[in-house]
Amino acid sequence: MHMINTSEILETLSMIDHQKLDVRTITMGISLLSCISEDEDKLCANIYDLITRRAENLVKVGREIERDYGVPIVNKRISVTPAALVTGAIKHPVKVARALDRAAKTAGVDFIGGYSALVQKGMTEADRRLIESIPEALATTDLVCSSVNVGSTRAGINMDAVRLMGDVVKQTAANTAASGGLGCAKLVVFCNAVEDNPFMAGAFHGPGEGDCAVSVGVSGPGVVKVALEGVKGASFDEVAETIKRTAFHITRVGQLVAREASRRLNVPFGIVDLSLAPTPAVGDSVAAILEEMGLEVCGTHGTTAALALLNDAVKKGGVMASSHVGGLSGAFIPVSEDIGMIQAAERGALSLEKLEAMTCVCSVGLDMIAIPGDTPAETVSAIIADEAAIGMVNNKTTAVRVIPAPGKVVGDSVEFGGLLGHAPVIPVRGFSAAEFIHRGGRIPAPLHSLRN
Amino acid sequence: MNEMKKAVISVLGTDKKGIIAQVSRILYENDANILDISQTIVSGLFSMILIADISSEACSFDALKTELDALGDRLGVQIRTQRSEIFEAMHQI
């Protein structure tokens, strides 16, 4: 067998030390379907017991893997069955949110996702109760993340849900006004949500999953940026090849960690999510990769094309490195969590419209964007509808995680702290979409022939 | 298949007497067998990469790492001990 050589070892060490290579998350998905009860306290106890039992060793094993391989594993997380599927027989789903929060704290994880409802076509009473409780749930828990799927390519867009989510986002911001509307950072509105996403805030353990699985989300925008510094002025063919090669290396680390976590926890391996997830740290930015390709600033003309190439090359490189790929796989463009994106927004180079265009060609959507606090709920709904339409028509996952920052106006900045970073408040269109949003009903699923 | 378990030990810091001697003593005491060493000094900066077989029953990765971490602190150099799989995974198909 080939003995690893010094230069390969140094390359790996340099990626970890200087280019911020890390495994962003090990996420354990847990099905809550066996917990169902019509007694609220019994349901909550079942959920707490099941999660704390299954995830008992998650954080410990995460730390051991980190220690053995010398690669940082930034987050350990739990995702659960969308809570609306297990709260059908009870009146107060928010109690489940609190049980999830307690279980996450006992397990010692960073976040728990799955206070969620899947309402792309219709909404049960349980879905409605859960969605209406989201603002309270996010204001009274610390670690719970919530998501709602309002549309899909097969079902169309549930515009009643879209209207409701505008209110929910606004109310969540109001309930967490003291922290700049932080609750909204834990709330994602999806179209075509995936069932095995390990990334927050949109992680949940889909109803098509088994009892338990561990998935891993990789990271490493800094590694890609540094690799591209080595091909300055080269053609896009070479740029794409370089990104593919780098993504392969990064993903192999994710695959190793996922396999080890699965073995040590004795839980089936779910997927590796091939994502380039930035952090606010310098040298860990997706925007910086696009700028390295030759753009003066992220958001200028050419950004969409650069991102399309990046997103595709990351997937092509990553797919071969892992036995099962899934989740959101692609480049993330959360504004507040990426120093290059923050700077681009502050310079006025990055508008909501450009971000929307970028979401057509990359993973997920309008992410961690602060908008003025007085933005009407209908405008938030309309932003959600636009983004869902992009996902629906293009057969991809899209999402909206915007923060209408209470009391803030364009030019202000909102500080979320930690990995969530800070965000300059960017303008939304001042013209009303209220009448459009109040129509309600469904936007029919799109035709998938005659594609233009 | 019972594959050989390996550790990669990388040392970086200001050059001083006895770094290699002390690292290899700890490896010997922990029943680890050195497979490969490469070492250079560039303008006073000592850099060494050592690959050791840690398959022996008497050899505990955790104990070895703890001792080498402590040695690094004593010598004022960075000593990192990692399982070799991360390097193999990244660079081999």
Image (cartoon, rainbow, N blue to C red):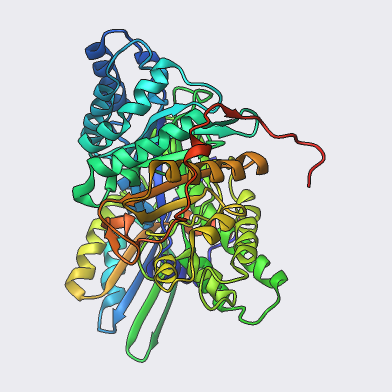
**Which residue sits at x=35%, y=21%?**
A129
Pick whichever, B75 or A438, lies toward us.
Answer: A438
Q: In which quarter of the image is the N terminus of chain A?
A: bottom right
Q: Image height check: is A218 above or below A299? A: above
**Which residue sits at x=61%, y=52%?**
A360
Q: Image height check: is A30 above or below B19? A: above
Horizontal side of B19 relative to A11 (left or right) equals left
Whether residue B4 is visible here, answered yes or no, is no
**Which residue sits at x=40%, y=29%?**
A116
Residue found at the very far top of the displayed protein = A38
Residue found at the very far right of the displayed protein = A450
Residue B58: x %, y % from top left: 31, 47
Pick whichever, A405 or A280, lies toward us.
Answer: A405
Q: In which quarter of the image is residue B76?
A: bottom left
The number of numbered discs placed on residues in the rendered structure image is 0
Q: Quadrant of residue A156?
A: top right
Pick whichever, A217 or A405, lies toward us.
Answer: A405
Residue A12: x %, y % from top left: 47, 66
Horizontal side of A4 relative to A183 (left or right) equals right
Whether residue A140 is visible here, answered yes or no, is yes
Q: In which quarter of the image is residue A184?
A: top left
